[in-house]
Structure formats: structure tokens, C-alpha cells
Amino acid sequence: MTTRAFADGVKRTVSAPAILTGVFLVTYVMAIPLALTLRGMLDGHLGSSLAAGAAADAVNYDWWQEFQSQAAGLGATFSPSVIGFAAPLDNISSVLDARSKIAPVSAVLGAYLLVWTFLSGGIVDRLARQRPTHAHGFFAAGGVFFFRFLRLAAIAGLAYWLLFGVVHRWLFEDLFESITRDVNVERTAFLWRAALYAAFGALLVAVNVLFDYTKIRAVVEDRRSMILALAASARFIVRHRGRVLGLYALNALTFLALMALWAVLAPGAGGAGAPMWVGFAAAQVYLLARLFLKLHFIASQTALFQATLAHAGYTAAPAPAWPESPSAELVQTGG
């Protein structure tokens, strides 16, 4: 059933190109203010100097170091980690190390999560129904579940605060220091830290999966109480943990395959002109693939949940209607 849910998730995601396009546009548009602000900072620092031409032709490391030493706020994020494959690695590292975001990025991220909260109801509803719901149906579902998911987001926020604010600090400050206090071999300390990363990552995955299935269960079963939906989802995950973990592993391997492909194909720092636009286009294709996997993640989990609990009434496609044409009427009436 795990592989079937995975394949069904691909089918459902592919059959909803409008959702993928919409999510991509929302992500792109919300990043524009940050991009324009950073562009203004770079333009103000470079001006019409000789360094501007050197920076356009190739990486000017000396200028980059000078800019970083003077930059503050959003400008401080313009580091070598924004180039190519380093960007997703830096994102993963920031999560595992619980690094806080600067205020402008946090504000945009908060707004993006709010928009995603609204879209989530429509996305799950569309992927669960396996048929077009059109704009009115999509946004109606988003509106119905928006405030329910806001309540769920408050619970999720508390859970993630406990993870990053309490558990992470205990693991990597108290426990790690206690374990490695008398360790003299750097490799041993590294292995202990890697083990703690794995433990924290497992907790993060468990919380993430729990809230994913809570959203799915809330939509498919039209639940109003998010606490009861949370409890029901926890029971579902525990009872079907083999299938849930197997599907998550398949999705994770797909994500790792995409990361490996991007590691090979990600463009480096090129000059102005065609190389710059090729690199930009490649980055957009990668972003589109990441969003496709995100939607597929939801679709495959929805498929597994529905197949396991046999919610056929919700997922059933509409009864096929006979084409409204004179020839069809003749066939239908025997004339």
C-alpha cells in the first residue's frame, strides 16, 4: 500500500497543475520584496565604481568581504552560501542548528506561512477529491479551514517552540557538553553531535508528520475540533506506523535524489549576460521541483490515509454525465 500511495500521490499532483502554478507564483511574488531590497543595498554599495564591473564579470571576493563587514539586516544574508547547492545546505543547517532568522526574513516567512495556512485547506481538498474543484471550490475550502488551521498552527507553534527552544538547547548545550567533556578525539565528538542531530531530526519528523496528517484528517472528515483531529491522527500514525514511515522514507529518498541532482547541476557564480540568466532559470526549475515534491508529499499522505480508512465517499469522482448533444440524445432514447 505504501508504494501504491506514493504512485497515487504522483498521479494526483500531476493532475493538479493549477495548484503547482499557483503555489510557485505565491512563493515567487513573496520573495520579490526581499530581492528588491537586497538589490538596492548592492547597487548603493557598488554604485558606478570599478568594483561593480568586476563583481558583474565574476566573483569579487575582496569586495564581498568588504560588503559583508559593513552590511546589516538583510544585507548580512548575502554570503557565499546563497550560491548554487550551498543554499539548500545552508537552509538544512539553519534548521538543525536552530539559527534564528533576521527580522525582514522572519516577517516574510510569517506572511508566507499565513498564506500557506489559507491555501492548505484548498490544496488538501483538491488532492483528496482527485478532480477539479475550480477556483470557487478551492477558495471556499481554503476559507472553511483557514480559522481551524490557525488554531492548529497555534498548537504547532507551541510544539516547535518546545523542540527548538527547549529540546534543542538541552541536546546540544547540556547533553552534548556533558557527553564530550572528557573526550579528546575530535572524531568522537563529531559522531556524538551527528547522533544528536539524528535524534533531533527524528523528533522534528515525528512532529511534522503528526500535523500533516491532522490537516488531512481535518479536511477529509470535515473535523472542527483540531485537538480531536490531532488525537485521531496520532492514533492513526501509531496503528499504521509501518505504512506511514515507509511512505515518509520514499518521499525522503525522492527529496534526497533531487538534492543530489541539484548538487551536480547547480550553477556556480557566473558572469553577467547569458550565464546569469541560465543560472537564474535553473534555480527556478529547482524551486518548481521542490514545490512539486512538497505537494506530492501532501498528496501521497492523503492517498495513504484515504486508502487505509476507505473514505471512498469523499474521493469518489462525480458520476459521468452524458454529453449534451443532439446525437447523444438520439443514442440515449434509441432514436
Image (tube, grey):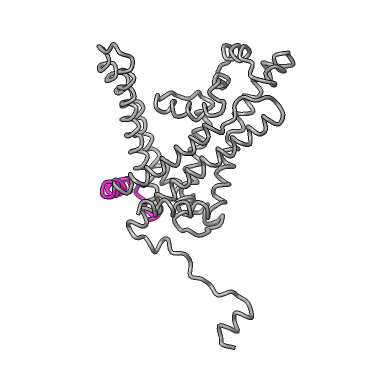
| Residue 243, x across and y down, in percent | 32, 49
Q: What residue do we see at 42% from left, 28% from top?
A: 95
Q: Quadrant of residue 249?
A: top left
| Residue 153, x across and y down, in percent | 40, 39
Q: What residue do we see at 28% from left, 18% from top?
A: 174
Image quadrant occupied by the C terminus: bottom right
Q: Residue furthest right?
A: 48
Specify start and end residues of the magenta stretch as a single range: 220-240
Q: What residue do we see at 48% from left, 67% from top?
A: 318
The question of residue 174 being in magenta is answered with no
Image quadrant occupied by the N terminus: bottom left
| Residue 170, x across and y down, in percent | 29, 22
Q: What residue do we see at 50% from left, 30% from top?
A: 88
| Residue 82, x across and y down, in percent | 55, 25
Depth order, front residue of 222/53: 53
* Residue 162 appears in the rendering: no
Query: Relative to residue 320, is residue 109 depicted above or below?
Result: above
Q: Main secondary structure of the magenta part?
A: helix
Q: Quadrant of residue 41?
A: top right
